[in-house]
Amino acid sequence: MTKPLRNPPHKLVVLLALAFGIGGWLRLDGVGPAFLFGDELHSLLGLSQGYGHLMSHFSPTGSGMALPLIQRALIDAFGNNHWSIRAAAWVPGLLLIPLTWWSVRRWFGEGIALGSTWLVAASPLLIFYSRFARSYALVALLVLLTFIWTTILQPLLNWHAQQKNSERLM
C-alpha cells in the first residue's frame, strides 16, 4: 500500500477534478427530462401498493425487492420525479468515481488510481447505468464497497483491535 500524498502535485489535482467533474456531468446530464423506458418501468409497477407489498412480493418483472423499496423511499422523501426514481442509479454512479480513486490509490499508487478513476468516469456502460433507473450502478458500487471493506477497512479494524489487546496485556 502506498502512503497518501501530503501535497499532491497541481497537475494531479486538476486531472482528478476534471475526472470527477466530467464523470459527474456525464452521469447527471439529461436525467431529469429523459423519458422512462424499458426496464425502468418494471420497477415502478408496484410502487403504489406500499412498503408492505414491496417487502412481501418479489417483482415478477425482475426488479427484485431492493430496488423498488429504495425507489419508493426516495419518491416518498423527494417527490415523484425522474430524479428521485433514478437516484438509486445516479447516486451510486457518482460515488463510484471518488471511491475508485481512493481504493485503487491505496494499493497501486496515484498514477494507476488516476487512470482507473478516468476509466470509471468515462466508461460508457457505467455512465448509461448511472442514468437508468435500475440497480446496475448500485451493484457496481456494492462490489467496490465490498472490496474496500475486505482489503482496507477490515484489516485496519483488526490491526486497531490487536493494538488495544496488546496495550491491555502490558
Image (cartoon, rainbow, N blue to C red):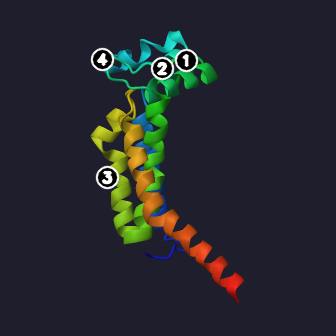
Q: Amino acid at mark 4?
A: Gly
Disc nearest the viewer among 1 and 4: 1
> Distance of mark 1 from mark 3, alpha carbons?
40 Å
Residue corresponding to mark 2: 56
Residue at image point 49% right, 62% down: 13
Quadrant of image for the N terminus: bottom left
Q: Position of residue 143 (x, y in %)?
A: 38, 49
Q: Amino acid at mark 1?
A: Gly
In what element is the residue under mark 1?
helix
Instruction: Of the two numbered discs 3 and 2 on the same chain, state the one appearing first in sequence.
Output: 2
> Distance of mark 1 from mark 2, alpha carbons?
6 Å
In what element is the residue under mark 3?
helix
For this rendering, which residue is in front, 57 or 149?
57
Instruction: Of the two numbered discs 4 and 2 on the same chain, state the one appearing first in sequence.
Output: 4
Residue corresponding to mark 4: 38
Q: Amino acid at mark 2?
A: Ser
Quadrant of image for the C terminus: bottom right
> Distance of mark 4 from mark 2, alpha carbons?
24 Å
Determine the image quadrant of residue 41.
top left
Q: Which mark is residue 52?
A: 1
Residue at image point 42% right, 38% down: 138
Q: Position of residue 42 (x, y in %)?
A: 36, 16
Please determine whether, in this image, residue 5 is positioned above or below residue 115: below
Residue corresponding to mark 3: 119
Instruction: Of the two numbered discs 3 and 4 on the same chain, state the one appearing first in sequence.
Output: 4
Disc nearest the viewer among 3 and 4: 4
Q: Are marks 3 and 2 in contact (CB under 8 Å)?
A: no
Disc nearest the viewer among 3 and 2: 2
Question: Quick check: 58 left or right of 167?
Answer: left
